[in-house]
Amino acid sequence: MNLDFTKLDGLVPAVIQDSETNRVLMVGFMNEEAWRKTLETGFATFYSRTRNKLWMKGESSGHRLEVKEIRTDCDQDTVLLKVVAHGPGVCHEGYESCFFREWREGEWAVTDEKVYDEASVYGGKK
């Protein structure tokens, strides 16, 4: 099946969801090479728009995302990866999910507890 990489300068959004809890863990972007690498390895690989390079989630932290199921939307320009997250968290700020803030009464509130010390994993780098 071909994905449509033409709409976002060669990228498709990739929604990452825990395969057991269905919690959304993060959103990344894939180019065709990252897509192929994900299919080949079984681990989520993304294209970093800021660093202009491929990166496999967990390269630095060891918190890899093992792909269990892949879906696409009706336009075939977004993918949903259901994964098993190896490691305590996905977010580079120390949380299980990158979606640890909730809009409450006109401001963002942190609603989750940190699950690991990001400084010890990333050495102060994000």
Image: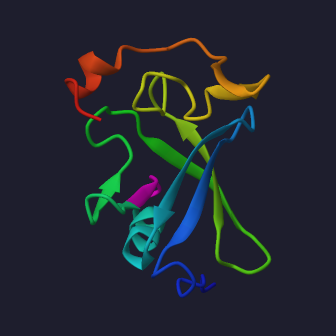
Left or right: where does residue 81 sit relative to residue 56? right
Q: Which portion, as a residue range, is magenta?
A: 42-46
Who is closer to the viewer here, 23 or 52? 52
Residue 84 coordinates in the image, percent (x, y): 57, 38
Residue at the spot 60% in from the left edge and 86% down from the top edge? 2
Q: How is the image coloured?
A: rainbow
Residue 121 coordinates in the image, percent (x, y): 27, 23
- Magenta segment's dominant SS is loop
Give the vertical position of 117 relative to 54 (above or below).
above
Residue 104 coordinates in the image, percent (x, y): 77, 23
Say whether residue 11 is magenta: no
Quadrant housing the N terminus: bottom right
Left or right: where does residue 98 sit relative to residue 1? left
Say whether residue 45 is magenta: yes
Left or right: where does residue 74 sit relative to residue 24? right
Give the vertical position of 45 relative to 61 (above or below).
below
Residue at the spot 44% in from the left edge and 26% down from the top edge? 87
Answer with the quarter of the image where residue 98 lies: top right
Give the vertical position of 76 relative to 114 (above or below).
below
Residue 108 coordinates in the image, percent (x, y): 65, 26
Going by the picture, which residue comes out furthest to the front? Answer: 106
Residue at the spot 57% in from the left edge and 83% down from the top edge? 7
Going by the picture, which residue comes out furthest to the left? Answer: 123
The tally of labels here is: 0
